[in-house]
Image (cartoon, helix red, strand yellow):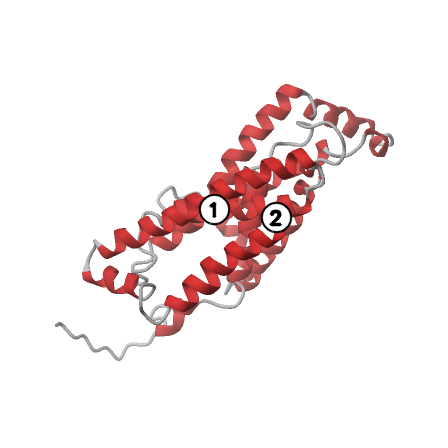
Amino acid sequence: MLEIVTTRANPMIDPPCTCGAGRSGLPVPRRLGRRLDGAVGVLPAPGRRPGARSVGFVLPWLGLVLLSLGMGALFLDLEHKLYVWRMYLTFQPASPMSWGGWILILVYPFLALAALASIPDDLLAGWPAIARFAARVREPAALRRLGSASMAVGIALGIYTGILLSTLGARPLWATAALGPLFLVSGLSTGAAFAHLIARDPDEQATLLKADNAFLGVELALIGLMLIGLLTASAVHADAARLLLGGSYTAVFWVLVVASASCCRSRCRR
């Protein structure tokens, strides 16, 4: 074993060992993102179903609120808040962080268009230009394009966080190609469950219930594939997987994460 000892401690160049622990602001956007990418990527655009009871009329507004809260939490976690604008002066295709920053910004216009399409005509009577634009957005062809683009952006929003975390070699449990799809399916399942909880239309409730069951099954399958992949990888990855298979985090993961989440969703469906 090779040991290296250094006494260098330059601020912002030699970070302390606790730099990877994260701060309290980071879990907030991840939890909000689970609901947001499901709301953006799973559900149809407003107007696909007749009647104002459609959950598609509510989710764009909730998505704007959740996205703003998540972006606010990320902003509070930044070390140099005044320089956040510099991130949007460039785009690095090889950087998951650069992809994530631009994806979060691109979600806003699609949510805004969906929210605009959900506003009744009588509320836009005083703004004829906005009313004409909203009428164009509500056209069937425009709604189909909006729905397709929203699904693409929602998939990108859901998968990029898993890809970002899987690149952190210091966390062997995260260093798996299954983490990106797992984040995506977990977000879709959470979004479908949340939409089912607030939906009032019986047909939409039945559709969302089927979608949530399918996503939950795929999510459990991906967890199994992730553990199999870690166990058949290097010794470091196998040791990380054993933390969830008889190790110190077994009860926390399988009881508080897997079992409790499944039970809560089953309870909400009743």
Sequence-earlier tag: 2 or 1: 1
Q: Which residue is denoted by mark 2 in the rendering?
A: 269
Q: Position of residue 77 (x, y in %)?
A: 53, 63
Q: Is residue 58 left or right of residue 191?
A: right
In this view, the residue in front, 87 or 118, is 118
What's the amino acid at mark 2?
A: Arg
Gap between marks 2 and 1, in whole Å?
Answer: 13 Å
The part of the image, by quadrant, that contains residue 60 is top right
Q: Position of residue 62 (x, y in %)?
A: 67, 47
Q: Does residue 170 sit above or below 228 in this rendering?
A: below
Query: In this view of the protein, which residue sits in the foreground, 187 or 150?
Result: 187
Residue 99 x %, y %: 44, 44
Res 124 quadrant in image: top right
Image check: 262 left or right of 246? right
Residue 257 vertical placement versus 63 (above, below):
below
Q: Nearer the viewer, residue 7 or 246?
A: 246
| Amino acid type at mark 1 | Leu
User: Considering the numbered disc 2 on the image, is that residue within a helix, a strand or a loop?
Assistant: helix
Tag on residue 216?
1
Q: Residue furthest left?
A: 1
Please tell me in which quadrant of the rendered image residue 32 appears.
bottom right
Label of residue 249 in the image: none
